[in-house]
């Protein structure tokens, strides 16, 4: 009798879970393809935004009149205060959201005319918190391209400066990453994410705070890997550290959802605008840290 009561409780719990799962599966997504979308195998990577506006809530614009152009081999950096719309802007490119007004084109095609699968297959993203699965490191690298050979996985890991630390594990590429990559450090997780992006070989690359909150050694290794990853691709970089974006071909400064400045680092630093203020703030912060470090080093033990 006790066993039957326990089974009944389990069945009720499972039924409730199943109902929630089917509710999720039956949800109609906001972003839908056209009945006969254009399927592109490989894009060149020319991105153009024309008078783009976006709002999560009606009447509350997060992006206002965004105009930009980017192409293969060009690095476009997005900087600005927190909440200025940088991440929202790059999330429009893989069509996580549709603009409220305006149009976004890739190779001349309106994003809304392309199939979501073919669009997103050409876009790689390396985020501040890269998601790793519980599987092996090999499986995590192959996630975006399961048909890749073992040699291709190794080459991607070498290019991402990940091969050395992977081979230090007793099981090498068969090492299990743990829940959300718990067995790896932050820098190691980022290098696995970069290897994954390299293996997919995307034409458009989005880097959202990919080197933040890392120690200097890890950041240097990741910056080296990113330089290799960005070659020949259309790259969008979001970073709070201005040292990360100084070499970008074009820097867009966003404030309250608008592009308020654009140009190279040298041009913007000398313009006396918001970018110049951000440079000064970060310079003062760096000086203060150096002074604290020197004071700590010179203090009597």
Image (cartoon, rainbow, N blue to C red):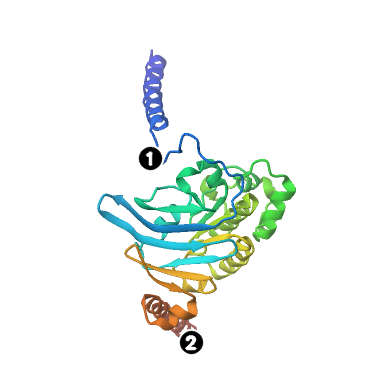
Instruction: Work out whether residue 292 can be spotted.
Output: no
Quadrant for residue 203, please give it: bottom right
Above/below status of 81 relative to 7: below
**Looking at the picture, does residue 22 appear above or below residue 217?**
above
- In which quadrant of the rendered image does the N terminus lie? top left
Coordinates of residue 77 in the picture (x, y in percent): 48, 67
Camera sees residue 112: yes
Instruction: Farthest residue to the front: give it.
Output: 108
Mark 1 in CB contact with mark 2 (< 8 angstroms): no
Q: Residue furthest top?
A: 1
Residue 125: x and y in percent read 53, 54
How far apart marks 1 and 2 lie (CA) works out to 60 Å
Judge left or right: residue 296 versus residue 149.
left
**Residue at 56% from the left image edge and 43% from the top image edge:** 118
Q: Secondary structure at mark 2?
A: helix
Give the crowd class for mark 1: few <14, some 14-19, many >=20 residues within 10 Å.
few
Quarter of the image for residue 156 reads bottom right
User: Which residue in the structure is indicated by mark 1?
Assistant: 30
As helix, strand or loop, the secondary structure at mark 1 comes to loop
Q: Is residue 271 above or below residue 45?
A: below
Can you tell which of label 1 and label 2 is closer to the viewer? 1
Label 2, residues with CA under 10 Å away: few <14, some 14-19, many ≥20: few
Q: x and y percent of residue 120 in the render? A: 53, 46
Q: Of residues 156 and 230, which is closer to you in this image?
A: 230
| Residue at the image point whose x is 44% and y is 80% from the top | 269
Q: Earlier in the sequence, mark 1 or mark 2?
A: 1
Q: Residue furthest right?
A: 151
Mark 2, residue position:
298
Where residue 209 sits: x, y (%)?
Answer: 48, 62
Q: Identify which residue is drawn at 68% across, 59% down.
A: 159
Q: Which residue is located at x 62 percent, y 67 percent?
A: 224
Q: Which residue ends up furthest to the left in the rendered image?
A: 59
């Amino acid at each position: 009798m006790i066993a039957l009561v326990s089974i009944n409780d389990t069945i009720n719990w499972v039924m409730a879970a199943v109902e929630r799962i089917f509710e999720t599966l039956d949800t109609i997504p906001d972003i839908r393809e056209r009945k006969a979308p254009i399927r592109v195998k490989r894009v060149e990577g020319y991105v153009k935004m024309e008078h783009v506006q976006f709002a999560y809530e009606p009447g509350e614009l997060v992006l206002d009149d965004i105009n930009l152009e980017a192409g293969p081999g060009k690095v476009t950096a997005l900087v600005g205060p927190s909440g200025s719309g940088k991440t929202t802007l790059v999330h429009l490119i893989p069509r996580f959201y549709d603009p409220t007004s305006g149009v976004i084109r890739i190779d001349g095609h309106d994003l809304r005319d392309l199939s979501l699968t073919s669009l997103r297959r050409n876009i790689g993203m390396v985020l501040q918190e890269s998601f790793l699965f519980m599987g092996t490191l090999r499986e995590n690298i192959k996630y975006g391209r399961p048909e890749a050979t073992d040699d291709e996985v190794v080459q991607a890991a070498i290019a991402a400066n990940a091969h050395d630390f992977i081979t230090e594990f007793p099981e090498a590429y068969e090492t299990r990453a743990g829940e959300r990559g718990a067995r790896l450090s932050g820098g190691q997780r980022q290098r696995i994410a970069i290897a994954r992006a390299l293996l997919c070989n995307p034409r458009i690359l989005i880097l959202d705070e990919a080197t933040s909150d890392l120690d200097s050694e890890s950041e240097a290794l990741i910056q080296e890997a990113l330089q290799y990853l960005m070659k020949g691709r259309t790259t969008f970089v979001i970073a709070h550290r201005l040292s990360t974006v100084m070499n970008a071909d074009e820097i867009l400064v966003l404030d309250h959802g608008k592009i308020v400045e654009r140009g190279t680092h040298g041009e913007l630093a000398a313009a006396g605008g918001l970018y110049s203020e951000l440079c000064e703030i970060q310079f003062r912060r760096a000086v203060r840290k150096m002074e604290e470090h020197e004071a700590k080093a010179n203090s009597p033990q």
